[in-house]
Image (cartoon, coloured by chain):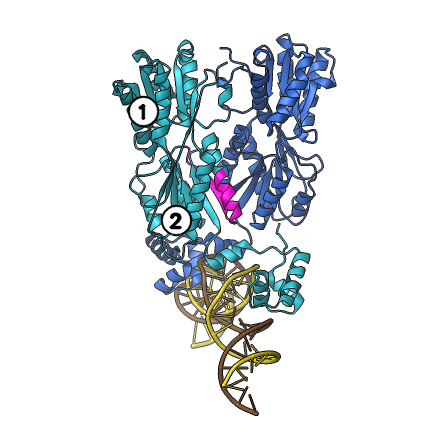
Chain colours: A cyan, B blue, C yellow, D brown
Amino acid sequence: MRFETSTIKDIAKALGLSTSTVSRALRDRYEISEETKKLVLAYAEKVNYRANPIARSLKERRSYSIGIIVSEIANNFFSQVINGIESIAYDKDYHVIISQSHESYKQEKLNVEHLASRSIDGLLIALSSETQDIDYLRELYAKGLPIVFFDRVPGDFETHKVIANNFKGSFDATEHLILSGKRTIAHLTNSENLSITKERLAGYKAALAKYHIEFRSELVKYCQHGGMHSAELEQAVKELLPLKPDGIFISSDRLTTGCIMALKKTNPEVAHKLAIAGFTNSNLVDLFSPSLTSVKQPAFEMGRVATELLISMIEAKRPVTEFETKVLDTELVHMTKH
Amino acid sequence: MRFETSTIKDIAKALGLSTSTVSRALRDRYEISEETKKLVLAYAEKVNYRANPIARSLKERRSYSIGIIVSEIANNFFSQVINGIESIAYDKDYHVIISQSHESYKQEKLNVEHLASRSIDGLLIALSSETQDIDYLRELYAKGLPIVFFDRVPGDFETHKVIANNFKGSFDATEHLILSGKRTIAHLTNSENLSITKERLAGYKAALAKYHIEFRSELVKYCQHGGMHSAELEQAVKELLPLKPDGIFISSDRLTTGCIMALKKTNPEVAHKLAIAGFTNSNLVDLFSPSLTSVKQPAFEMGRVATELLISMIEAKRPVTEFETKVLDTELVHMTKH
DNA sequence: AACGTTTTTGGGAACGTTTGCACACTTTTT
DNA sequence: AAAAAGTGTGCAAACGTTCCCAAAAACGTT
């Protein structure tokens, strides 16, 4: 099974021109006369000529494709980010290759290396919750692969990054729980080594401090696997409930839904009494019971911004040396009662 | 910014061999002596040689990549299918490029053509709910692009297809509503031209017939945009409720969640009285209120099977002329009460 | 010692582009 | 009138592979 398709050579032969002339005409170069251009364009149109991107890539030593690593596309936050990424990428004629780490370091590394060997021009990545060692990324970066981090970013890596205002998002959510009268607020969060974990914890602490509520470290539970394993969540819930929290603030999408599920499964009566606030971009949040107050990240925008930064790095003529970390505001969506 | 990487030529020069020998040694061809192979492999390892897939693609006239078109990755059904696809594809060393139609025919066509121009080796596609005219697919197929349809398949296109047992899934769900005492069962479904719509309608009708319940066409509402526009859903709900249904069977993922949302928004009191059954693969279904009985499709398996069929077509030496339509069983998951 | 075989290697074209350079022809400038 | 500049085109190399074909080396066999 093979595609039969016409090439520049075919056009050149048919028109009695050289391949260079045809190539230049198709790319609308100034050297070619209007007449010839029209001729070539018309004929190309007629035979439905499509440039072979592979040949072009080989010649130009770039693939016009960018790699994306997220933990899972089933997560609405990430699928919204991807939509943002695509909206920019397609405009600029890049295509995207999506890979999922499923929160596993091993899988993440494997995927990145697979992508790199496929000669992507750049990489957009949100680290997995397991990831601690990013030397493999440093290596690729040093070899010339542009990388932009989003959402889960490493502290010690000099490149562009795009994140939500995690501190403020956390602060607002926690404050909201406090203002609705809660005093014993648990915090369920991701693995300790993620940037978002630290920032969100800080926001939570700051809100408590503002209202003179003592911070109690036993009310904070970390989930190494980011909620991918339900046993991990159920264990966390089991350890938290004896402390009699009246509210809980959960710091990531997957954890939020997973935690509510664990609550419903193990302690359905408590589930509806506890005030819940959590980061989530789920578009089904209105259907949830118990309902919750959610911190929504500007996911689509995050994808757009990250992609713009990445493409600017890819297309830079000289190595980029000044980097920025863009911080985008979150939105607090109050619980709908029903 | 450019990758510096070693090539077969570099290895050949360093080792005083020809490129052909190196190429063959790397691919472990029988003609090359063990000695030379070892030498080449060791050196390649040392300089961290990675074959350039683009050059290979150009030479072999295939890209080792397959395209996927789904309506949206945010939909759990499709993200599960994609996981199934990837599980096979990566094994066989293909990579996948995912595109979303967002249920728009125009977008679907654009994406397919974009993928085709990127020289994918094959296409996996679930048609958008708007799609009626698939001539553009026929054209590509005729030119030699292998295509496998899944979930939403056209009736009149001779190729491999993978679908769920939609009739039985529908039948079971409807019967379940009947057995729990419902008699006036509405049916909310996708656009009329989709294969799944017809099959699921037939299952619904058959269940009614089995229990001698009259089929009433006014209880069936079609959604042209597959639930992508909330106005469409709210309109459908608004038209259905005056008929006083005591149960409703909804025939697709997006519609199911959308419909419950519309119900809660426009008629919250009715929402909790109505018995709901619907197709959905949402992994959050346990959180929903009102709760529902769901028909789960074997999405992961569907992805696997479709990919195996596609790759068999791609790698066939002679054009494939015998096609199969694989039908996979659905699973009825009963409502959890809470 | 001359000849076949078999095994191992190398030369070079090809895949479809892009692009630096040279060439031929026109037009302008001196 | 010759020289300079401008315009439009073609030649050929290159990108990194794969693979057909031939050549060389190693090994019997008579």
Residue type (three-letter) at the residue carrying disc 1: Tyr
Asked whether residue B174 appears in the rendered view, the answer is yes
- Find disc 2 in the rendering and name its residue: A146
User: Helix or strand or loop: what does disc 2 sit on?
Assistant: loop
Q: Subunit of mark 2?
A: A
Range of residues picked out in magenta = A84-102
| A249 or D14: nearer the viewer | A249
Mark found first going from the N terminus, 2 or 1: 2
Residue where numbered disc 1 is placed: A204
Residue at 34%, 26% in the rendered image: A171
Q: Is residue B283 above or below residue B322?
A: above
Judge depth for marks 2 and 1 and give the one in front.
1
C27 in relation to A3, above or below: below
Chain letter belonging to callout 1 = A
| Image quarter of residue B42 | bottom left
Q: What type is the residue that disc 2 sits on?
A: Pro
Do labels 2 and 1 touch, CB within 8 Å? no
